[in-house]
Image: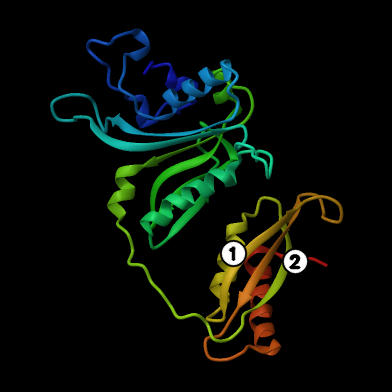
Amino acid sequence: INKNNDDKLRMPADDVRRKSIPIMNPLSEDQGHMRTSMLPGMLGVVANNINRRNENLAFFEIGKVFLLDGELNSTDLAHEKYNLGIVLKGKTQSNWLEGGVEYDFYYLKAVLEELLDVFRPESREYVPCVDNPTYHPGRTAVLKVNGQEIGVLGELHPEVAENYGIKGRVYAAEIDVDALFAIGAAKPSVSRLPKFPATSRDLAVVVKKDTPAQALIDVINTNGGGLLKDVQIFDVYEGEQIASGMKSLAFKLTFQAEDRTLVDAEVNTVYDKILAELEAKCAAKLRA
């Protein structure tokens, strides 16, 4: 790659990826260093396609990156690893049934969710990230699997897209493939179909705009006990009837017991506990 990609990606001065390894006999000046990220080449492909009026793009690449922990000498040698790069731009392909869907952060997250389902990790977490200058603050997350950080996903910073001659939003992810394979798959678990029906409750609360939904989900799961089986967020709203600087989050809570049909009093007890903890831990207020 060309060394100027470090600046085009807005890498911090102390980023280890700036220690790229020079090639002694490069084919050209633009290919004078070993790559430390999958993004430069992939964004170049995006730009080339857009110049040829291919606006809707979705592709991936698995390849090696080369990193230095220290200085390039006889004791501090470079190490290489496989990374997965994913880039989305524009819309999905339309068909006779529906038009194309705009790519966004959640579409990219869903792609990674399908990948992780193959590996069956014990836990997966998307942690909001605001300090990676390559990506848009507030639209980026660090991916943690079994507590280990293995990658980043999100919308590229507009300045980065502009540096590569790309107009509009671009979504990208870069995942450490070696780390993903090293985690190992958890054993699949199965359970009998429930004999007793589930019941659901909707819960809509108002919180500060900068409160992450995951913080509320964690509180709900922690206080749901054995009766809470599932939590799904189905609405995020900002606008009329919601105070400035606030947002409304709505969740569907599913309750079920394995040995009986639940009665309202049981569900109400758990529901009220969840609401009280949301108020205490997240300053959430029940939406009227």
Quarter of image, res 77: top left
Between the C-alphas of marks 2 and 1, the distance is 15 Å
Q: By what rule are the colours in the image chosen?
A: rainbow
In which quadrant will I find the N terminus?
top left
- For label 1, the SS is helix
**Rendered residue at 30%/50% (across/down):** 181
The image shows residue 49 at horizontal and vertical percentages of 53, 20
Amino acid on which the number 2 mark rests in the picture: Lys
Percent position (x, y) of residue 26?
A: 27, 11
| Residue under the point 30% across and 32% down | 64
Q: Nearer the viewer, residue 80 or 52?
A: 52
Read off the residue under disc 1.
Answer: 217
Kindly give the residue lying farthest to the right in the view shown.
240
Q: Are marks 2 and 1 in contact (CB under 8 Å)?
A: no
Q: Which residue is mark 2?
A: 285
The three-letter code of the residue at mark 1 reads Ile
Foreground pick, 47 / 214: 47
- Whole-percent x, y for residue 83 in the image: 35, 37
Mark 2 vs mark 1: in front: 1
Q: Residue furthest top?
A: 28
Query: Quick check: 102 above or below 271?
Result: above
